[in-house]
Structures are given as structure tokens and as C-alpha cells.
Amino acid sequence: MPYVRLTIYSLGCALALGWGLICPAQTLAQTQSRPPNVILILADDLGYGDLGCYGQKHIRTPHLDQLAAEGLRFTQFYAGSTVCAPSRCVLMTGLHTGHCYIRGNARYDLRPEDRTLAEILKSAGYATAHIGKWGLGHEGSTGMPTRKGFDYFFGYLDQVHAHNYFPTFLIRNEGRVRLDNVVRPEGKYGEGIASVRRHYSHDLFTDEALRWITQHRDKPFFLYLGYTIPHANNEALNPKYVPSAESRPTHGMEVPDFGIYRDKSWPESERAFAAMITRLDHDVGRLVARLRELGLDKDTLVLFSSDNGPHAEGGHDPSFFQSSGGLRGGKRDLYEGGIRVPFIAWWPGTIPAGKVTAQVGWFADLVPTLAELARAQVPERLDGISLVPTLLGREHRQRQHRYLYWEFYERGGAQAIRWGKWKGVCRPFWGQLELYDLENDPAESRDLADRHPDIVAELRRLMKEAHEPSPLWPVPQPKPSPGRR
């Protein structure tokens, strides 16, 4: 009788796999003695082409390149948005910008009903920490990390505060920690440009992360490490913060030194930009080394990505290093260069080494993926799918997305949708749809809308389906052309 039950169960699993599902008996969660630790590292404004493993020729990133060589590198992975706050909202909630609560860079706070990835993992017994940049809740609000599932927080709450790499304070849990930097004048949210620079926030985040990992090595943990590199200090060139032109910096790429790029003939802004990324790379190496020292490397899934495409701020020119990797556009665009980002997954002994995948994924996938690995209950209404089959090298079992969808509320608004190989872009909101075949034209150089009216019609239908009106996010109205009234 047991043999008969086993046979029927196995047959049911085989049928389920035929329907694109994963048989529970084959999931990782039931074959591991304990769920994995998870470290999610997010860079800020790092382009698709800014790492050596993604084709960068001038900026050295040996540790991240090694992470990719020992793990899995995605070539078609997308951020939640093309700017900071909404991208992080998608990451934390698993909902796309057509109906998540925070859809743009405004000072809104997550609500009690907005369930986060941290809350899901905490419910499964994980110790949880967020170190770095949050951007989804302010002091005293319902959106503070410690009120959204994180046991511990150290970093910036406000995204404008996070522009300043030498701030006068950071937040630990729910209180301010004073630093010895001097910022005069200082903005309402702690932004500005430091005249006395003693504590570099990025370095503090790395040190804090190393301590926290060591302290929590004996139980499953989730560390969300939101670095601010290589974002610019946008206030550095603003006369409001540095009135004297003589003392005003020439760029806003704040880094303690140029490192290995000090003797390059590049502009200062580009030497600083490169130094920021190599500093980030070095510290990822420190984190991986600590995992190995503690014997946690085979028990830990490390994920690395960026919140959107490369910026053109603080004196930096994204074309200097080809930061978009040959893709069209950058930050604040919904073309590929604005939303396609690096994504590396490393888990020695579990994720096959040296693999590259063209599986389409995005930030919304992390909630169902990590919930499955943590053996936690997955919320019902999500816009992501679990990428566990792809992580384990079982891509033939991987479910696929119906579509990916983005909205952007600046510059008159824009929308984008990916449906299979097809990409649609509307500028402005609900405007004329541009159509691109990403399989044959990843640089989005040929608009094929006139040739495929049936595809255009279907993409418009799906965009209507994806968009839910919100009083906080009214559809941007196009500005009249010159001469019109």
C-alpha cells in the first residue's frame, strides 16, 4: 500500500510539473535541514554595464565578478522602477507600480496594511535587519523599518538625506545617532554638503553589517543591505548649500579618495564614480569573506542588484563608462537602460556555479522566491513569481510571467510593459505606444508599432488591466505644445 501511495503521488507531481508548477516534494524547502540565511545587497543607481561581469572595461569589480563566476548571473532582470522609492516599494511588497502604494519619489510612508518581505521572513522565524537606505517611511511614521518587519535598522530613512555621504546623523532603530561630520547649512532632512568629513556612511554600513551577521550566525537571518553607492550628492553643486563658487565642489560623487584611479587622466567626477563602485565591490568581498570565516557560506544566499539604471547627476556622465551597457536610456527612463539591472545570485553548493540565465525576472519576484525558501506563507496577490527553479538550475520547471509593468510619474509620465519578447513604452502616460522586439533589438532602436498593430492593441489592453487609479498618483497630464492653449 505505501508503494501505491508513493506511485500516485509521484504521478501527481509529474502532472503538476507538466502544468508549470513545482512538485512540493521537489522544492528546496523540504530538502534542507534549515532555510538559508539571505543577504540582499542593493546598490543605488548602478547601471547594467557598470560591473566587469556585465562588460565593464575600466572600473574594477573583482569581488562581484567572482560572485558571478561562483553563482548565477541574470541578463534580463529588472528593477521595480526607474527611480529610488517606488523601486524599493516593489522590492519590499512584491507589487508593481501600477498598484503599489508608493509609485514615485514622494514622501509617503508605508501603511500597516502594506506587508513587506521582512514581515514575511520574520513570521518564519528569521532575524531581520536593514542597514543602509530605506526611503519608504520617515521618523515616527508607520513606514519605519522597525515597524515593517525589521528587528534592527541603521541608516537613512529619507532618500534626500541619503544624498549626503558625510551626514551629521543616521538613524539606529527609531532614534538619531550623531556623527562627527559638519554640514552647514543643513537641509530639513539632513541633506547638504559636509565641510568636515570624518565618518563616511558607506563604510559605517559595511562595519555594521559585519557585526550584525556575526551576532546572528546561530539562526536564519535576513539582511537587507541598501548601499547608497554610486548615487550622487545632488546638493553638492547647489549654491543653496555651498554659496561660495570658490569653495563649491566640482562634482557630487562623494568618496574619501580616488583609490586606484587617482592617477587616471579622467575628469574628477569619473575618477570618483569609479572609486565608489570599486569601494562597493571591495566591501562585498569583505562580507563574503566573513561568511566563509563563520562557516556560513554554504548556508547563505547572497543576492546583488541595483535599484535602477545609471544616473547623470553630480557631474557624472553615464556615457563615459558606458554604464547602460549598450542599452537605451538611464535613470528616469523606462527604456531598458533605466530599468534593466545587474542581478547576481550566489549560494555555494546549492546554486550551480558559473551559470548565466536569460530568465526574465524583476524585483517583484523576490517576495515569492524568498518566502518559498524560508517556508513562509506567500501573500495571495503578488506580481512576482518564485525564481527558485532557476536558482537551482531547473529552468525547465520555471513558471513565466504574464507580463511586467512599470509606471513613472515624473516628466509628464510614462509607462512600459514587457510581454514575452515584446516591449511597449508610452510617453506620456497613455500616449502613443512604441513597440520593440527585445529578442532582436535589446537597444530599442527600431519602433515596430506600425508593423504590428495587433501586438500594440494587446499591450494597451494589458496596460489598462495593470493600472489601478490612486488619489495619491493622478495620471500626469501632458503639457501643451508651444503655441497651443
Image (cartoon, rainbow, N blue to C red):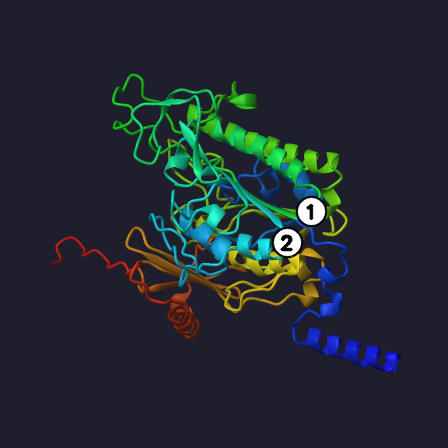
Q: Is residue 219 above or below residue 278?
A: below
Q: Which residue is mark 1?
A: 219
Residue 31 relative to residue 92: left or right:
right
Q: Quadrant of the C terminus?
A: bottom left
In the rendered image, is residue 61 in sight?
no
Q: Earlier in the sequence, mark 2 or mark 1?
A: 2
- The residue depicted at 41 percent of the width and 53 percent of the height is 110
**Who is closer to the viewer here, 115 or 298?**
115
Q: Is residue 220 above or below residue 209?
A: below
Query: Residue 93 location in percent, x, y?
Result: 49, 57
**Who is closer to the viewer here, 42 or 118?**
118
- The residue depicted at 47 percent of the width and 55 percent of the height is 90
Query: Residue 265 location in percent, x, y?
Result: 48, 21
SS under mark 1: loop
Q: Which residue is mark 2?
A: 125
Q: Is residue 91 above or below residue 315?
A: below
SS under mark 2: loop
Residue 167 position by quadrant: top left
Query: Residue 247 location in percent, x, y?
Result: 31, 17
Residue 429 position by quadrant: bottom left
- The residue depicted at 51 percent of the width and 65 percent of the height is 382
Q: What's the amino acid at mark 1?
A: Lys
- Would you call the spot at circle 2 few (<14 residues within 10 Å), some (14-19), or many (20 or more)? some
Residue 177 position by quadrant: top left
Residue 422 relative to residue 395: left or right:
left
Q: What's the amino acid at mark 2?
A: Gly
**Who is closer to the viewer here, 3 or 71?**
3
Query: Residue 236 location in percent, x, y?
Result: 34, 28
